[in-house]
Amino acid sequence: MESKLNELLAKRRSIYALGDQVNVQPEEIFDLVKTTVRNSPSAFNSQTVRAVVLFNQSSDKVWDIVEETLQKIVKDPAAFQKTKKKIASFRAGYGTILYLTDTETVHKLEKQFPSYAANFGPWAEQAIGGAQQAVWAALAEQGIGASLQHYNPLIDDAIHEAFNLPASWQLRAEMPFGSIEAPAGKKDYLAESDVFKLIN
């Protein structure tokens, strides 16, 4: 069975060689992210996903924070040079999306539905994962490359301070995006028998 969606999902890859040669205006990308996140599902329609879309110096600031934070942690100079080069590849992109979970909404639901209280945290993770994949695919459809990074919680406080974010917004991932300057590497898959089971 053919699926245009699967073609798009296959096009969505982790692109690490990013550039800023994107012929889409920031406002258009912001609208794309807004629409895509709004159309992504969440348990109890809780809508716990928050997204901050950054361009220009604001985007660079994210990776400046990452670099400054890791410089304090990575003691080996040679290892840090590799880290610095990796961070520079993210900074070279067109923008960055911060994905966050509104923990205030999660806690309200835990109190409102105590029988399901233990599930609202994991369900919020499912919601943000679905939103990330959807945005990633939507960017790929526009020919824009991206990858998903996780420097939280190391950078949480500095990010909140730099962009004046609500305390209840918990940072979960960072997505640098931009023009595709080099294709993604080969993708390997687990054996189907280790992943899938058909039961009639």
Image (cartoon, rainbow, N blue to C red):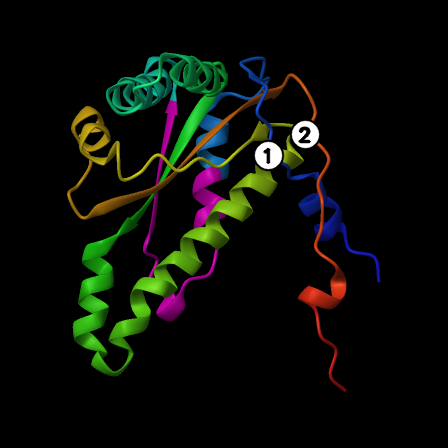
Which quadrant of the figure has residue 24? top right
Q: In the shown orientation, is residue 191 left or right of residue 77?
A: right
Sooner in the amino-acid sequence: mark 1 or mark 2: 1
Residue 157 drawn above or below residue 8 = above
Question: From this viewpoint, which residue is outermost toward the bottom?
Answer: 200
Whether 187 is drawn above or below 184: the answer is below
The stretch in magenta equals 33-54
Callout 2 environment at 10 Å: few (<14), some (14 to 19), or many (20+)? some
Instruction: Say few, some or many: other residues with alpha carbon within 10 Å of mark 1 (under 14 / 14 to 19 / 20 or more).
Output: some
Q: Amino acid at mark 1?
A: Ser
Where in the figure is residue 59, as x and y percent of width and height? 37, 20
Q: Quadrant of residue 161?
A: top left
User: Of residues 20 and 193, which is closer to you in this image?
Assistant: 193
Q: Are marks 1 and 2 in contact (CB under 8 Å)?
A: yes
Amino acid on which disc 2 is placed:
Ala
Quarter of the view holding residue 157: top left
Relative to residue 152, is residue 189 depicted above or below? Answer: below
Which of the numbered marks, if any, corresponds to residue 107?
A: none
Q: Is residue 166 visible?
A: yes
On the image, numbered disc 1 is attached to which residue?
A: 14
Q: Is residue 47 magenta?
A: yes
Q: Does residue 51 appear to the left or right of 7 in the view shown?
A: left
Q: Can residue 39 be seen by looking at this rendering?
A: no
Give the Cα separation between the discs numbered 1 and 2. 6 Å
The quarter in which the N terminus is drawn is: bottom right
**Residue at left 35%, top 17%?**
76
Residue, disc 2: 184
Asked whether 197 falls inside the magenta stretch, the response is no
